[in-house]
Amino acid sequence: MTGYTYKGAVDMSKGNKKSKKPLLFIILAVLIAAGLFLLFNAKKEADSDKLFTMSTNAERVEYLNSKGWIVNPDPVSTTDIVIPSEFNDTYKSYNDLQQSQGFDLSQYKGKEAVLYTYEVLNYPDYPKNVVANLVVINDRLVAADITLQGENGFTAGISDS
C-alpha cells in the first residue's frame, strides 16, 4: 500500500498558504480604509480651520457674507474684551446659543479676545440697528451672533434669520 493517500486527509502545508491570503487581504483592506478615513478627516479639519481664520477684515466680512449677511465692510467697533472666568446667567445663555452653532466659550474662560461688530444691511424687517458680532481669539473665531440693538432687541445665531 505504498503511494496510497487517504482521501479524507488534509494537506496542512497547502491549506495554510491559502488561508493566509484572505486574512492578508482583509488586513490590507482595513489599513487602506483607515488611511483614507484619516486623510479625509484631516482635510475636513484643515478646511474648517480655513473657514474660521479671522486674521484680516476681509476674512471676517467674507465669513459673514458666506452666512448670508451683507454688512458694511468697515467694523462699527473693534473692542478688546475678556471672556469671564465665571459665567453668570446671561453668559450661560449666550454660551448655549454658541454651543448650538458649534462654538463653546467655556474653554476660553478668562482669555482675552477681540469683539468685531459689523452693521448688518439685509436683516429681514429690520433695516437698522442690527449688528453681527464676531469674537476672535488668536485670529480664530470662537463665537458669533446677530443682535438687534435697542429696547426690544434680541440675539440670535449667526445663521438664524
Image (cartoon, rainbow, N blue to C red):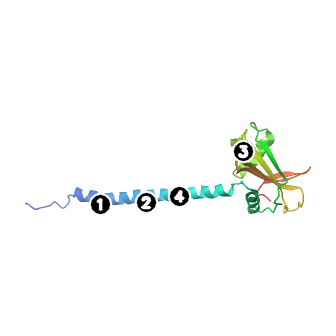
141 sits left or right of 70 in the view = left
Q: CA distance from mark 2 to mark 1?
A: 18 Å
The residue sitting at 76% across, 57% down in the picture is: 57
Q: Which residue is mark 1?
A: 18
Residue 63 location in percent, x, y? 73, 59
Q: CA distance from mark 1 to mark 3?
A: 57 Å
Q: CA distance from mark 4 to mark 1?
A: 32 Å
| Total numbered circles | 4
Q: Which mark is nearer the camera, 2 or 3?
A: 3
Check residue 39 in the rendering and tell me which mark sits there, or answer none.
Answer: 4
At label 4, the amino acid type is Leu
Q: Which mark is nearer the camera, 4 or 1?
A: 4
Q: Earlier in the sequence, mark 1 or mark 3?
A: 1
Residue 49 location in percent, x, y? 64, 55
Q: CA distance from mark 4 to mark 2?
A: 15 Å
In contact (CB < 8 Å): disc 2 and disc 3: no
At label 2, the amino acid type is Ala
Please tell me whether mark 2 sits on a helix, a strand or a loop: helix
Check residue 29 in the rendering and tell me which mark sits there, or answer none.
Answer: 2
Q: Earlier in the sequence, mark 3 or mark 4?
A: 4
Check residue 105 in the rendering and tell me which mark sits there, or answer none.
Answer: 3
Residue 111 location in percent, x, y? 72, 40
Q: Report crowding for label 3: few under 14, some 14 to 19, many 20 or more residues within 10 A (C-alpha).
A: many
Q: Earlier in the sequence, mark 2 or mark 1?
A: 1
